[in-house]
Image (tube, rainbow, N blue to C red):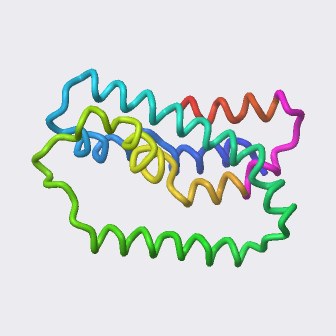
Amino acid sequence: MNESYVYTIFFLLLGPLKIIPDFLKLTRGTDRAFKRDLAIKASLFSSVIVFFVAFTGRKTILKYQLSLDSLRIAGGVVLLISALKMMFTKGEPLDSPPDRSRTLQLAMSPVSMPMIIPPASLKRLLHDFPEWNGSLPRRLRSSCRLISW
């Protein structure tokens, strides 16, 4: 598998351009310090998630002998529950800005997951990352390139 192909796929899935509208909508009416704090925390959480999945995800799948179909079913159930929860819970009004004390919660969800790292990118990461040949330093360098986007 060509590394440029993998980077192109990850740029489309993890790319920064798709995050901007949702991030602006989420932080509407907040000050610059709140936005910066939220962006930094979300970037750190996303980096940890990508490293964790890249280096332990495949081993975990093999250790517990999980099939691709079982992962698809589990992912579908998680997405269904998430969609039902969003449909049937009463959310905050759009006009009220998020509370400053909630930056950590907002950074984890919804900013890190699923805005920065959608489920499709985790699937691609599990599928493509182990196939990159090379030593641990090369894999670390490759994953740092992914995160730097």
Question: Which quarter of the figure has residue 58?
Answer: bottom right
Place of residue 51 in the rendered image (x, y in percent of width and height, measured from the top left): 68, 39
Place of residue 74 in the rendered image (x, y in percent of width and height, measured from the top left): 61, 73
Image side of residue 73 versus residue 1, left or right: left
The reply to whether the magenta stretch includes residue 49 is no
Rendered view: 114 above or below 77 = above
Asked whether residue 42 appears in the rendered view, the answer is: yes
Question: Which quarter of the figure has residue 3?
Answer: top right
Residue with the most extreme top position: 33
Observer-nearest of 19 and 80:
80
Residue at the image position 32 percent from the left and 39 percent from the top: 102
Residue at the image position 32 percent from the left and 67 percent from the top: 86
Residue at the image position 19 percent from the left and 55 percent from the top: 92
Residue with the most extreme front position: 101
The magenta region covers 127-137
Image side of residue 55 versus residue 85, left or right: right
Rendered view: 81 above or below 144 = below
Observer-nearest of 53 and 21:
53
Rendered view: 112 above or below 149 = below
The reply to whether the magenta stretch includes residue 131 is yes
Residue at the image position 54 percent from the left and 75 percent from the top: 76
Place of residue 121 in the rendered image (x, y in percent of width and height, measured from the top left): 58, 54
Rendered view: 104 above or below 65 = above
Asked whether residue 17 appears in the rendered view, the answer is: no
